Image (cartoon, grey):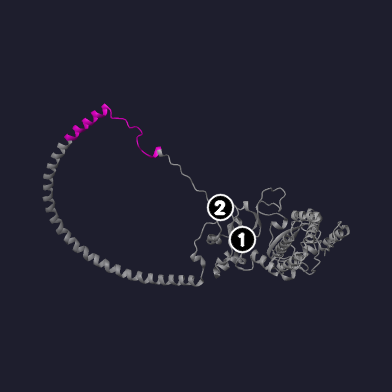
Amino acid sequence: MAEVTGSQDVEESGISMVELLKEEEERQLDAAAVLGAADDTKCTYDQGYVKRQALYACMTCCSVDSGRLAGVCLACSYHCHEDHELIELYTKRNFRCDCGNSKFPHNACKLLKDKLPENPENGYNHNFSGTYCTCQRPYPDPEDTTDDEMIQCCICEDWYHGRHQGGSVPPGDDYVEMICGQCLAKHDFLAPYMGLAVAVVKAEESKCVVDVEKSTGKNPQNGSSSPVKDKQERTEHKDAEEAKEKDKKDVEEAKEKDKKDVEEAKEKDNKDAEEAKEKDKKDAEEAKEKDNEAKEKDNMDAEEAKENDNMKIQVIGTEKISGCKLNDLKKQDLPSGAVFLPYLWRKQLCTCDECKAKYEARGVLFLLDDEDPVSFYEESGKSHHRNPGADVQRELEALSSLDRVTRTEMVHEYNTLSSSLREYLRKFAENKKVVRDEDIREFFSQLEANKKQRPGSSIQLFCK
């Protein structure tokens, strides 16, 4: 009984087999997502410029000082550069394996001999020399203590710190791809599509402070009137009475004058009317002539305008036939930082002939390729991986047939194996070496030789 209790403590302090199998399943899927359907025994050179593949940069063969930038495929990283310092580049588009070409003068490819000296269509950036982002720092950076996510731009494929792209990164479920600020500045034709972007930074609202005391315009003092003010009011009243009498007299005189002026004006108006009648008759004749000339000109302008309208209709018809989405999109200002875009945002890009020509001229025609996004590559890699869920289910069914003591002993042995393997692999991580099949076999050979049967245990464990 005491032995069972102790075993229970071991199981509770370690990890359950269900958790172990689930973790293994997740690790397999993560590896499949990164490596895709790559064959780790065959160089991808014969496949030409692969649409997307996992790549590695060898710092042993192409050091920073050499000035040579090169990338090798998964198989070559295992068989041709197994003891070298490798940098994982994750994935790159339209790339052909460089292993063994003129960039590797002292290291021939062991998997494929006949290769061209160079791959002119390959694209390289500073990632191939081990630096990333606008800060030009390595990853992981031993001097950087800030917890920040690295995100890959879907156009230039460089990796950036979120804090170096103008704002905080939105939740991972809100976006699928990112375009860095440097690429946005180069490709201003993307401006009409900025309405699709996930909002990252909100401008702070401005605050306005109003000085109420200065804006009222009221006298803050409410005192009573003074004697000086009363005298002034009496003087003003007297002046007003005198002005009233004067105004009355002036009105009478004005009436008389107005009467006289009316009579004189009437006589003058009669005379002017006769003259105006003669002038109007003459003006009417001149106006008639001008109207005839204007009508003739209007007819000519109408014919000309009709021809212009027909031309405009033809142009508009051509635009509608072309189906350019830009006719319905409002151009927006490009942000100074990165933009984060949701799933299927590329489907909103215009595919008319004019826009396609623009994409091709800018070297971004891949944006219209449904198989270009990293998300597609990852899902394809997972789908090529055989269903690990079935293996997990079979293993769980096998475990359920064992008694509790046996299961506890197995968990204890797994924890021992896990700690030993971590210690063994640490030297590879410190020396930046690739773990080969031979290394794993050597580890289990040593483990088997050093394993001692624990007292009281009747379980035989086998490592394959």
Residue at 56% from the left image edge and 58% from the top image edge: 198
Q: Examine the rendered structure and indicate whether residue 234 appears above or below residue 427.
A: above
Q: Position of residue 80 (x, y in %)?
A: 80, 63
Q: Are marks 2 and 1 in contact (CB under 8 Å)?
A: no
Q: Quadrant of the C terminus?
A: bottom right
Magenta segment includes 352: no
Question: Amino acid under label 2?
Answer: Val
Q: Nearer the viewer, residue 57 or 12?
A: 12
Judged left or right of residue 454, residue 267 is left
Q: Earlier in the sequence, mark 2 or mark 1?
A: 1
Q: Nearer the viewer, residue 358 or 399?
A: 399
Question: Amino acid under label 1?
Answer: Glu
Q: Nearer the viewer, residue 155 or 344?
A: 344
Q: Position of residue 257 (x, y in %)?
A: 12, 45
Q: Examine the rendered structure and indicate whether residue 356 appears above or below residue 139.
A: below
* Residue 148 visible somewhere in the drawing: yes
Residue at 51% from the left image edge and 58% from the top image edge: 332
Mark 1, residue position: 177
Q: Secondary structure at mark 1?
A: strand
**Callout 2 crowding tier (Cα within 10 Å): few <14, some 14–19, many ≥20:** few
The quadrant holding residue 284 is bottom left
Q: In the image, which residues are magenta?
A: 213-242
Q: In the rendered picture of this protein, how many numbered marks are placed on residues?
A: 2
The quadrant holding residue 358 is bottom right
- Residue most extreme to the front: 1
Mark 2, residue position: 201
Judged left or right of residue 170, residue 295 is left
Q: Position of residue 179 (x, y in %)?
A: 60, 59
Secondary structure mostly seen in magenta is helix
Q: Secondary structure at mark 2?
A: loop
Magenta segment includes 241: yes
Q: Examine the rendered structure and indicate whether residue 220 appears above or below residue 313.
A: above
